[in-house]
Image (cartoon, rainbow, N blue to C red):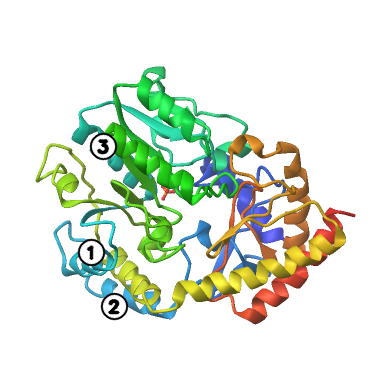
Amino acid sequence: MNRKNSETLYSEAKNYFPGGVSSPVRAFKSVGGTPLFIKKGDGAYVWDEDDNQFIDFCCSWGPLILGHNNAGIREAIIEAVHNGTSFGTPTRFENRLGKLLIENNRFIEKMRFVSSGTEAVMSAIRLARGYTGKSKILKFEGCYHGHVDSLLVKAGSGLVTFGVSTSAGIPEAFAKETLVLPLNDLDAVEKLIQETDDLACVIIEPVPANNGLLLQTKEYLEGLRTLCTKYNVLLIFDEVISGFRVGFEGAAGYYNIQPDIVTYGKIIGGGMPVGAYAASNELMSCVAPEGPVYQAGTLSGNPVAMSAGYAAAAQLIESGFYENMAAKTQRFIVKIDDYCKAKGYEVTFPTIGSIFWIAFTHDTIRTAEQIDPKSMGKFKVLHAELLERGIYLGPSGYEVGFVSAAHTEEILDESARIMCEAMDVVFL
Ligand SMILES: *Cc1c(COP(=O)(O)O)cnc(C)c1O
């Protein structure tokens, strides 16, 4: 496979951007080699600058649940752009998207649009602190909540592969306000809550999917809800990845658990930069201009992004959408899993909805600490073999894969066949 153009572009990019990229994990550091420069996507496929074609299971890290270049989203964006890209005023497009999202989600009453997942989480934390008048927050090891100062403590995503548990540039005084516990241990949560009188909130990815896929039990998540209610602490579901992915109501709907604040990102903008945080009327009335918690954004709720989000949501809400996504993902994964089992390969495929992870172990993994860093050597081989065979996975073994609505059964059958072939090389 020729990658000459990507290589040339990458060496040029290194003159302009740290590591040659606008976001760290894109640099291929953990799998080695040169990142592919993608010039085009359509349906389940992307093409790089050397005209290689790939079946894409990264899907822009999750947002593209309808595949690349979705016709409905494309047309909505073009139509909106004809009238200008941003006014810094309210528009009817925010109303339309807000109404659709809120009327079809039992867990939220009011929301605020922002421009990224990080911004949504940062604002949700501020709201929790503003509402409760308390400072400390509790997060879980391996949960990634964006690059917010107070949450870059034992986080996942790009940070895992860099082998650092926190970032430089975060004052110790900030980090001290963040308490961290392992997932899957309710007793530890209760003990910590009892010992901490200044705790504003507990924040969790209800579907932890940024450090492998650390699926928690429903009992655990319900237990968190019970403890938060009992001790008067707010529960934040960071649904930037699970929102509109495991169901239209996200993980809150999937597990039927009412969080106090929910954050969204990724899918909510239909591929444009949008995030949001949402809660009850009472909580959201603390946000400026209604209340004292300040939060603003020059390009927030801009008409192009709102139109893209609406065009996406209108397709996601069609009946059977999520059942179909889960069924075809299951069918795809079972094919690969059956093959690997028959061959005795030490690998499993945790799955929820249309998210899957490749775990090089037979154990059920529920905490970050259970992941053996040495197993990432196998992922590196798999990643390279798949690229050669025309499948694009996110370039890190800690990242999950996403199936989109554009991945037809034929494409998934072909992908399963290629995956099995590549596994043969991994376990050679
Ligand atoms: C991606 C992600 C974020 C950060 O979102 P950005 O849009 O990258 O800032 C936060 N939380 C979770 C759970 C995510 O998956």
Is any part of residue 2 visible from this angle?
Answer: no
Q: CA distance from mark 2 to mark 1?
A: 19 Å
In this picture, residue 29 sits left or right of residue 39: right
Q: Secondary structure at mark 1?
A: helix
| Residue at mark 1 | 98
Query: Which residue in the protein does label 2 denote?
Result: 79
- The image quadrant of residue 158 is top right
Instruction: Please say if the residues under marks 2 and 1 sit with CB atoms less than 8 Å apart.
Output: no
Pair 1/3: label in front:
3
- Which amino acid is tagged 3? Ala
Assess whether mark 3 and mark 1 are in contact (beta carbons under 8 angstroms): no
Location of residue 36 in the rendering, given as x and y in whole percent from the top left corner:
64, 57
Q: Residue furthest left?
A: 290
Location of residue 218 with respect to 62 vertically, above or below: above
Of callouts 3 and 2, the N-terminal one: 2
Q: Where is residue 176 drawn, in percent x and y?
A: 40, 20
Q: Nearer the viewer, residue 271 or 377?
A: 377
Residue at horizontal 38%, vertical 74%? 73
Q: Amino acid at mark 1?
A: Gly
User: What residue is shown at x 61% (from left), y 55% (from top)?
Assistant: 394
